[in-house]
Image (cartoon, rainbow, N blue to C red):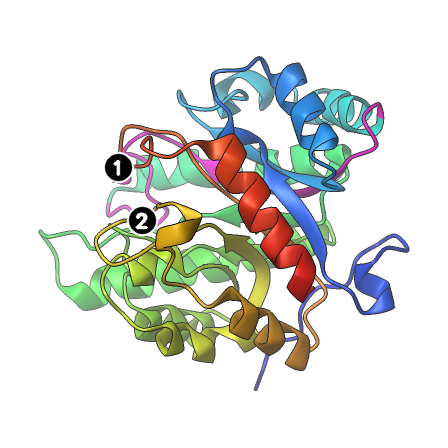
Amino acid sequence: MKKPSPKPTKASDAQKGRLTLACADYAFPLLPHGKVLDLISALEFKAVDIGLFEKRSHIWPSSVLTSPVRSGEKLSRRLADRGLRCADVFLQTDTSFVSYAPNHPEPAPRRVARDWFLRTLDYASAGGARHVTALPGIWFENEKPAASWNRCCEEMAWRVEQAGKHRIVFGVEAHVGSIVIKPGDALRLAKDAPGLTLTLDCTHFTRNGLPNSAAYPLVPYTSHFHARCARKGRLQTSFKDNAIDYALLLRGLKRVGYRGYVVVEYVWIDWEHCNEVDNISETILLRDFLRKHL
């Protein structure tokens, strides 16, 4: 059965049948966070994805999750001052995919991951977000693949249940280095973990040389959508070298009744050559292209 996409909580373009553009705050890490929000507002986006990445974003989980409700309320005010909404809170608990992977074989790291997730739900709810994204975990080499997979499914289902208590939709991102590198694995996970949706980022598939069509089966399970330019061998590239047919993907999202955000999500980190394009210029180019097809 196809999973319905989340509906926005306020009257918005999405409710009127138009998809709404947002921008990721972690696209511009060299600016102070207030200036980043100013820039996103100046670029005429209506909403922002908040990166909650330990040790590598403006806002670290270890800082704000000690008082998640108060921190979330502070974020809400900062966004409101600039006419922005919180589209998503994207939790990453460590710079390593391993340390606190949700499907870690050891109970202690899993407890930490669960605790931070629960606090993230409080933070996101207080910040006005109706969507939270996290990573799915990895394959652990010292155990049978089925063990890593089953534990991942259990943890994702638990997160779906906890998010539902906050009226928040939970989406997982299939990404390079994860337990769901291939679109088929992402589809399997969405089916095996009841209620799970996807934060779809096709660049991770394109980077591995897969065609655009490989992502199409994931569209009905998508609750949040990341867009940036990519090609084979490059997770992030310039608009002129882009190999992803976003016009076709947007039509697919509309066809299944998608009512979430379309997020221009460039990153600037020394990983996968993701610091080799001009994020401001590329954000504008992709924004203008997406506007024509929304």
Q: Secondary structure at mark 2?
A: loop
Q: Residue furthest top?
A: 32
Task: Kindly report the secondary structure that dominates the magenta region of the rendered protein.
Answer: loop
Disc 2 marks which amino acid? Leu
Circle 1/circle 2 CB separation < 8 Å: yes
Q: Taking 140 as reference, is 292 above or below it?
A: below
Q: Residue at x 32, y 75 (%)?
A: 184
> Horizontal placement of 136 versus 139: left or right?
right
Find residue 156 and report its horizontal and vertical position in percent: 46, 58
Q: Is residue 173 magenta?
A: no
Q: Residue at x 67, y 37 (%)?
A: 124
Quadrant in which the N terminus appears: bottom right
Q: Taking 215 as reference, is 64 above or below it?
A: above
Q: Assess disc 2: are there few (<14), some (14-19) or many (≥20) residues with their C-alpha within 10 Å of its C-alpha.
A: many
Q: Is residue 84 visible?
A: yes
Q: Nearer the viewer, residue 35 or 224?
A: 35
Quadrant in which the C terminus appears: bottom right
Disc 1 marks which amino acid? His
Q: Nearer the viewer, residue 245 or 77?
A: 245
Q: Nearer the viewer, residue 4 or 284?
A: 284
Q: Secondary structure at mark 1?
A: loop
Q: Which residue is mark 2?
A: 235
Q: Residue at x 20, y 55 (%)?
A: 139
Q: Which residue is mark 1?
A: 273
Q: How far, Cα to Cα, is label 1 from label 2?
A: 7 Å
> Horizontal placement of 169 versus 204: left or right?
right
The magenta span reads: 81-105
Q: Is residue 100 magenta?
A: yes
Q: Taking 216 as reference, is 102 above or below it?
A: above
Q: Quadrant of residue 208?
A: bottom left
